[in-house]
Amino acid sequence: MSIKKVLTGNHAVSYGAMASRVQVISAYPITPQTQVVELLSELVADGKLDAIFVNVESEHSAMSACISASAAGARAFTATSAQGLALMHEMLHWAAGARLPIVLADINRAMAPPWTIWTDQNDSLSQRDTGWMQIYVESNQEAFDSIILAYKVAEQVFLPCMVVLDAFVLSHTSEPIEIHDQEKIDEYLPPYRPMVTIEPGKPIGYGALAAPDTYMEFRYKMQRAMENAVEIFEKEGKLFGDMFGHSYDLVEPYMMDDAEYVIITVGAVTSTARVAIQELRKKGEKAGLLKFRVLRPFPFEKLRELLSGRKKVAVIDRNISFGHHGIFYQEVKSALYPLSNRPPVFGYIAGLGGRDITVSDVVDIYEDMKKRETLEEIIWKGVKL
Amino acid sequence: MVEIRTHGRGGQGAVVASKILADAAFRVGKYAQSFPQFGVERRGAPVVAFTRIAESEEELPVRSNIYEPDHIVVLDPTLLSIPDTFAGLKEGGWVIVNTPELPENLDIPAKFRVATVDASEIAVKYGLGSKAQPIVNTAILGAFSRVLENVIPLSAILNSIPEEVPVKPDANQKACEEAYNMTRIRK
């Protein structure tokens, strides 16, 4: 039977991992992720979750333990934030290159220095090119659901997946979520069936030397796996909806049917932007919202289909690539380049280091985009100059 | 939608108070969201937490801080002298204060409604926290439901307490009930 409960985003992640019947958890605590692994370690200790919890001395080791567990055929899970994710960087490449379907929850926290614990996306986006899939969620329900969905997709394409949620705005926010019926979850997500496993007594090499005559093919296959993941995300997101009542896609339109001006958001700010779009619609504006949910694999086709022919597009980035632009802005622009009727795209940087993004901020961004005549690629919203 | 801001000091339980409000609202069929304005929490430092309560999920997607609360809950009377405490409070909004003072004795503008209860004394009586540092969150929520029963009834708060406060749930429930009965409302 499903249960409805008021939970923080962090605990939604813990219960998502439990519902996915993870077998090995290895993690190192870091604010704001700590509650995720605190609860998981309690659930393991109390015998409510049949898993091994491996305590380690660093995030690098946490990912190493997950890699070993996954290579041995176990469903492995970890969670981290900011500097912790950065410390994993080397092993993130390893997990993806070894084609291990590990799931990691990253509680988006801005990078230090200056020291900070609040949200932005530079931690997860710094790992964009490691070969991990990335899902950015909007609510605690979506955090819970996405952990399950992440395993379902990862174990079909043999690539690891990161589920990313905003520090505090989701991680420490309590709201009602539905914990779906476990039998149905088990039906949706059957046990992991690895292609190869390492076993004592049956030695095989993993990640051995690949000379120039073979290495490139490994990379080609990773790219193909990512490309295939687009369709699998679509299919599994729909099936999730059929079974649990809420379907998921890689990009999700809101009031887009007749929209002329579109705002693109990522993560929790999407919820706030929905209210802004409702307000703009009441004033007669043809405003639409596009929630960018899955960054890798990149949803080229859907994005082009949804944005082609619109008058203008604004991307709100809670991140920055220093010396370039907002990262989702770069990605959207480059995806639209082959279109002949591509709309002008404006890039807004907002909410870095947890600065609040309000409904009126989003309305301002909309109005600012609408009145601009020349293309601006980096517009700072809310910075004190 | 009703928006509530809770002001306290680190260690008084402001964040848990806002969680209890959300959980209790959910128990009476409403949709709710609570979150702390998270700092690096230190004992004694001002802490702010937010709660949004709506009749349905559709009303509630905003995820920014609350700048214009309908009501405020103040766990430490010394916070009344900080202008931030009243910032944006809507006219007619309740100011629910933990203090031994009568509400008439507090210097709070007439455009607000005021309720007081000595939550610290009640918390000490029931062994919640220490005498120097009582944990007043469950007691002050008794006062909350006394004046805002239509938003959250006392019974729902009492039912949420064991969920959110696993330590001494009985004593916390008793403190909450006693505060409900002892609440004084400005005439």
Image: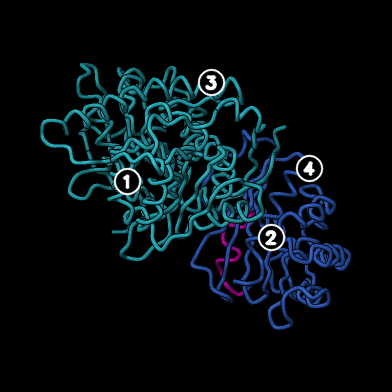
Chain colours: A cyan, B blue
Compared across the picture, whether A372 is left or right of A278 comes to left
Q: Position of residue A178 (x, y in %)?
A: 65, 36
Q: Amino acid at mark 4?
A: Val
Residue A319 in sight here? yes
Label 4 resides on the chain identified as B
In the rendered structure, which amino acid carries the disc numbered 1? Leu
Q: Is residue B120 above or below residue B144?
A: below
Q: Secondary structure at mark 4?
A: loop
Image quadrant where residue A161 sits = top left
Q: Earlier in the sequence, mark 2 or mark 4?
A: 2
In this image, A261 relative to B94: left or right?
A: left
- The quadrant of the rendering that contains the C terminus of chain B is bottom right
- Chain identifier of the residue bearing label 1 in the image: A
Residue highlighted by disc 3: A239
Residue, disc 1? A92
Amino acid type, label 3: Leu
Q: Position of residue A194 (x, y in %)?
A: 42, 31
Q: Nearer the viewer, residue A279 or B117?
A: B117
Q: Nearer the viewer, mark 2 or mark 3?
A: 3
Can you identify the residue that label 2 sits on?
B17
Magenta span of residues = B81-90
Question: Horizontally, is B146 left or right of A349 in the view?
Answer: right
Give the quarter of the image for residue A12.
Answer: top right
Quadrant that contains the N terminus of chain B: top right
Q: Position of residue A348 (x, y in %)?
A: 31, 42
Amino acid type indicated by mark 2: Ala
| A197 relative position to B185: left or right | left
* Label 1 CA crowd tier, 10 Å (few <14, some 14–19, many 20+): many
User: Could you tell me how far apart the alpha carbons at marks 3 and 1 are, in whole angstroms?
Assistant: 29 Å
For residue A9, above or below residue B101 = above
Seen at 65% across and 33% down, the residue is A182
